[in-house]
């Protein structure tokens, strides 16, 4: 059965048999594994995860939906981001006060 937290094409390996905390269902990813952040998950997802793993307060914990991508995909995304930054020009300083 496929684990809901790990995509079906993932390179992750379960380590619960070797873990001091098997209930956390930890996984390890190989060195140089790349991820793309699909979205930041909201309150309902945090509540579900918190209840499942016994955490009481996940207020200050960021929870993200990630997808594993290849190194080639990561390089392509980085190149596109760099090109967009170059096209946008230098960032304007922002001090929180109106400029004179």
Image: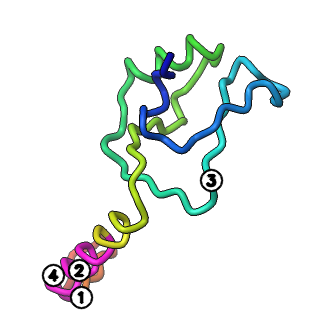
Residue at image mark 2: 85
Q: CA distance from mark 3 to mark 2?
A: 30 Å
Locate residue 1, reporting x and y percent: 50, 16
Residue at image mark 4: 88
> In terms of secondary structure, where does tag 2 sit?
helix
Locate residue 98, reporting x and y percent: 21, 75
Task: Give the side of residue 36 with respect to residue 92, left or right.
Answer: right
Q: Was residue 49 drawn as part of the magenta stretch in this picture?
A: no
Res 44 → quadrant:
top left
Task: Give the side of residue 49 with respect to residue 53, left or right.
Answer: left
Decide: marks 4, 3 in contact (CB < 8 A)? no
* Res 30 label: 3
> In terms of secondary structure, where does tag 4 sit?
helix
Residue at 36% from the left image edge and 72% from the top image edge:
75
Residue at image mark 1: 90
**Dot in front, 3 or 2:** 3
Q: Was residue 82 drawn as part of the magenta stretch in this picture?
A: yes
- The residue nearer to you, when weighing 87 against 32, is 32
Question: Which comes sooner in the sequence, label 2 or label 1?
Answer: 2
> In terms of secondary structure, where does tag 1 sit?
loop
Q: Which residues are magenta?
A: 78-89
């Amino acid at each position: 059965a496929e684990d809901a937290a790990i995509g079906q094409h993932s390179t992750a390996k379960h380590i619960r048999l070797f873990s001091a905390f098997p209930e956390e269902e930890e996984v390890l990813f190989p060195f140089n594994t790349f991820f793309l952040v699909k979205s930041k998950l909201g309150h309902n997802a945090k509540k579900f995860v918190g209840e499942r793993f016994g955490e009481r307060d996940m207020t200050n914990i960021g929870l993200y939906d990630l997808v594993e991508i290849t190194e080639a995909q990561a390089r392509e995304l980085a190149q596109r981001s760099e090109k967009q930054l170059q096209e946008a020009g230098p960032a304007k300083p922002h001090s929180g006060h109106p400029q004179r």
